[in-house]
Amino acid sequence: MAGKNKKTLQNVINVHEHPMHVPVSNKNPSGVTIRDQHLRRVNGTYLNREEIDSVFTNYDRKALIYPSSKKLDFENCDNYDDIIAVWTDYFNRKFSADPYLDPDVIKALIASESEFIENPPKNKKALGITQITLETFKALQDPSGEVKEFIFKDIRKKDLKDPSINIPMAIRWLFRKKRLAEGKLGRAADAEEIILEYKGLLRSKTDFKNSALKKFRKHYAELKKK
């Protein structure tokens, strides 16, 4: 318990109590009350929309590794390479990934999930170009959940229709799944193993395991073909 509290304190700071004006009443004849101090997350442990825009605009692109281009047969399939490259590198560095997550994993995932259509046909359970589920969307913003060390903040469901928001959120989630896969395997996870963990099928013994990978496997191979 003590360790948990220590970790929490690294991600939040106290905000001091301060006076707040309220309607005059019998209970509060002065019209002033003291707002209880509350906790605020420390910058660097979350991304809101403003920070997402700022990071992307100002990111140093000199040494970026971009996903493969001109390999997939989808309209607009190379339009998101800059977003993929920036955010894959950002999270590789943020989490000191070893080995680094390959940006082609993200591009192949997008191809398999939406074929690079920003707003695929209506799906009540998933949204946007990477088809983020509502459950994942909630988890990515939960300050006490499984990705609490680094979350997204104040992102609305309708924001998932914007690839500049949707893609970094999906990449963050892939890093969580990469870590879980490597914990289960006791070694570095390859592209297919990360995607299987993303789909909850890493240790599955069913035939569905391969069929669930079919599109991703095809597009990832196309991206890697020389």
Image (tube, rainbow, N blue to C red):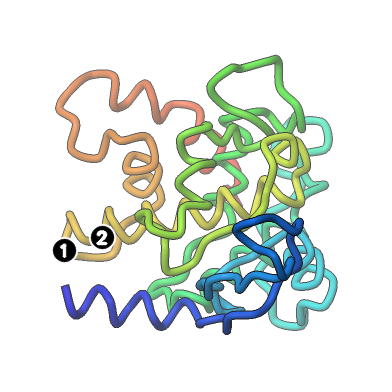
* Left or right of residue 154: residue 1: left
Name the residue at 40% across, 30% down.
Answer: 213
Amino acid bearing label 1 = Gly
Query: Which residue in the structure is indicated by mark 1?
Result: 186
Spot occupied by residue 121 in the image (x, y as percentages of width and height): 70, 15
Q: What element carries label 1?
A: loop
Q: Which mark is residue 178?
A: none
Spot occupied by residue 145 in the image (x, y as percentages of width and height): 37, 54
| Image quadrant where one finds the N terminus | bottom left
Dot 1: within a 10 Å radius of its alpha carbon, few (fewer than 14), some, or many (20 or more) residues? few
Q: Quarter of the image holding residue 61?
A: bottom right
Front residue of this view, candidates 12 and 94: 12
Q: Is mark 2 on a helix, strand or loop?
A: helix
Dot 2: within a 10 Å radius of its alpha carbon, few (fewer than 14), some, or many (20 or more) residues? some
**Residue 116 position (above or below residue 93):** above
Front residue of this view, candidates 127 and 212: 127
**Residue 35 position (above or below residue 169):** below
Front residue of this view, candidates 79 and 33: 33
* Left or right of residue 194: residue 223: right
Spot occupied by residue 51 in the image (x, y as percentages of width and height): 74, 68
